[in-house]
Image (cartoon, grey):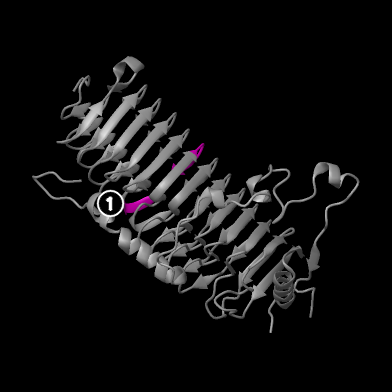
Amino acid sequence: MDHQHHKHEPSRLRQRRPKPRWWAVGLAGMTGLALTTVGVAAAADAARPFPTSAEDRPGKTADHPGTPDKPATGGHRGESDEQGKGKKEPKGTPVPCDADALIAAITLANARGGATLNLAKDCTYLLTTNLDGAGLPTITTPITLNGNKHTTIERAAAADQFRILTINVGGDLTLNNLKITGGQTIGDGGAILVNTGGRLTANDSAITRNIADGNGGGIANNGITHINHSSVDDNSAAVFGGGVLSFGVLKIRKTNVRTNTTGFVGAGVFGAGEVQIDSSTINANHASFGAGGLVMFIGIGAVTDTAITNNTAMEVGGILVNLDTQLTFKSVTVAENAATASLVGGLGMNPGSSVVVENSNITNNTADTDAGGIYNTGSLVLRRTKVTGNQAGDEGGGIHNTFGGAARLFGTKVVENIAATDGGGIFNDFNATVELNTATGTIVVKNRPNNCSGDVPGCAG
């Protein structure tokens, strides 16, 4: 084998006019479709349970993701400080710049119960052979792949379609300083598929330019996935989750999810189960139908210190929160998102959903019809938040509250939003309630053509 080669191939509802409501009505009935689609395409496992954080096995370095200077590095617990005094951490096994050598090393690691493998710098491991749907052997034990400077694992363009990696039950894969690219599959997980019982930690890595004809263009997760200090960009899925799709436990930290696309819903991140996003960006993703940035489909989620910006879709440019879902935003910017042909520029909420937004900015989002900033049919609490500069082509420039929606505002400013017909600041429809709580400093001013439409006590009109 020639180890010098850089690429080595181995052998709403207003009575005067109907409006589309796929997320307020249709998506409530989409649960079966989504689960069926994901289940069939991912692993013929439609009845799989959602894992919970309790499944995070103790002693994994992914629970301690490290710092920019010292990222997490392992798939197992190292020695304690006392035990490790005077000892060097194992360096791992070097793998020369050869795809066959990498395949052999992973095969041996699985057989031996795990390993740390150090990949070559300035190297592209170019995969050409389909090994049961992936270019590398299925991960079934704790394995760490340490990249070096400019280390890439790539599917060869001329090769048959396959993802790069599959992680099965018992598999615990850590990627450090690696680029994963070129994966393409007719199923889920264009780059990486994490099956139930599997675990993925990606540190300082790039998941880029992968394609799934099903869901999860970059990553499809049914187990536990942590993504730290990384990028998920330019991936594509035909159905859900252009960048990441998760029906398990998903934690994203200090990561850029950008310029991913999907043919249906949820171009950036499509989450169900447990989702935590911290100190990250979800930017410039595009969905052909709905929810360009983030979908929280079912479960519990928290988004903190994160920017969700410049995402686009026909409906719901930025964020969709589905029924029976709880989502908290703290110190989040939702800006410059656009619904290009229908409702909801920034944040859209289904009946039964519960959202709390604190210390955040919802600004400069646009909708072709209603709800430039927020569309609420669930339970919405805004605390110390600015809803500013949003625009709607019809009603509800800042907030459109309807279908039994309850919105409570504390210390919140709804300012300089625009609607083409009514409710520049807030449009409150029949059978819905808005509490401004002006004693806390809530103001609704300088909106056009009016501040409020409908029954909004305390609003100047």
The quadrant the C terminus occupies is: top left
Q: Out of 344 and 421, give the one closest to the viewer.
A: 344
Q: Percent position (x, y) of residue 339?
A: 31, 49
The residue drawn where x is 72% and y is 67% is: 113
Residue sticking out furthest to the top = 439
Left or right of residue 283: residue 70: right
Q: Residues within 10 Å of mark 1 (few under 14, many from 20)?
A: many
Residue sticking out furthest to the right = 86
Can the viewer see residue 363?
no
Left or right of residue 20: residue 390: right
Q: Out of 387 and 355, give the one closest to the viewer.
A: 355
Secondary structure mainly formed by the magenta segment: strand
Q: Secondary structure at mark 1?
A: helix
Write down the residue under mark 1. 23
Residue interval drawn in magenta: 304-314
Can the viewer see residue 62?
yes
